[in-house]
Image: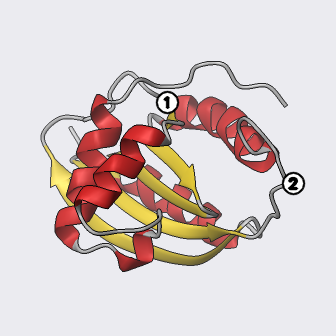
Amino acid sequence: MKKLTQLVYISRSTSVRPENFKGIEPTVGRILLKSRINNKRSGLTGVLYFGDGCFFQCIEGEEEAVLDLLQKIKDDPRHSDITVRSQRWIEKRSFGSWEMKFVAIEAPLTKLLESRGYKRFDPYQFDNQMDESVLHFLGAATAVDTISE
């Protein structure tokens, strides 16, 4: 059996969110729809959060599949400033039943950020402890299952 890898990366969205837009940003919705199909085929699981123009994503699976997906993300013009925050071996998946869990909870995450002294969701400012706190928060949060374009 191959080792499982967990990789967390952050990036900035290159798309512009329409003013006064409510709901899942259309580009994020398209990414989720496609990734859920592709991740199931590749044996990948994970979680995605999008806020203030930034992606925070955890991907889990066999190392080769995780690194292949990371390369696709690096080649994707919808992402910029891609930074791997952590990569580690894991015994079991944290998001085992989610091809790509999407969390769209603003208020509770805002409270977490404020409790740690952050004014907005900017993962480029987070330290390792905050990365872990966000990852734990996303794992415990209720996912958004319905996505429409």
Q: Residues within 10 Å of mark 1 (few under 14, many from 20)?
A: many
Q: On residue 38, which mark appears? A: none
Asked if 41 appears above or below 117 in the picture, the reply is above
Say what amino acid the circle numbered 2 marks: Pro
User: Which residue is pictured at 54% across the width and 56% down the height?
Assistant: 69
Image position of 107 (left or right of 22): left
User: Which residue is pictured at 78% across the width and 49% down the height?
Assistant: 27
Kindly report which numbered mark, 1 or 2, lies closer to the viewer in this rendering: 2
Note whether residue 77 is visible: yes
Tell which of 140 and 116 is nearer to you: 116
Q: Residues within 10 Å of mark 2 (few under 14, many from 20)?
A: few
User: Which residue is pictured at 87% across the width and 54% down the height?
Assistant: 18
Cβ–Cβ under 8 Å for marks 1 and 2: no
Image quadrant in which the N terminus is located: top left
Say what amino acid the circle numbered 1 marks: Glu
Asked if 117 appears above or below 136 in the picture, the reply is below
- Mark 1 = which residue? 99
- Mark 2 = which residue? 18
Q: Report x, y in % for residue 70.
A: 52, 63
Q: Report x, y in % for residue 125.
A: 37, 78
What's the CA distance linking mark 1 and mark 2?
Answer: 28 Å
Tell which of 1 and 107 is nearer to you: 107
Which quadrant of the view contains residue 55? bottom right
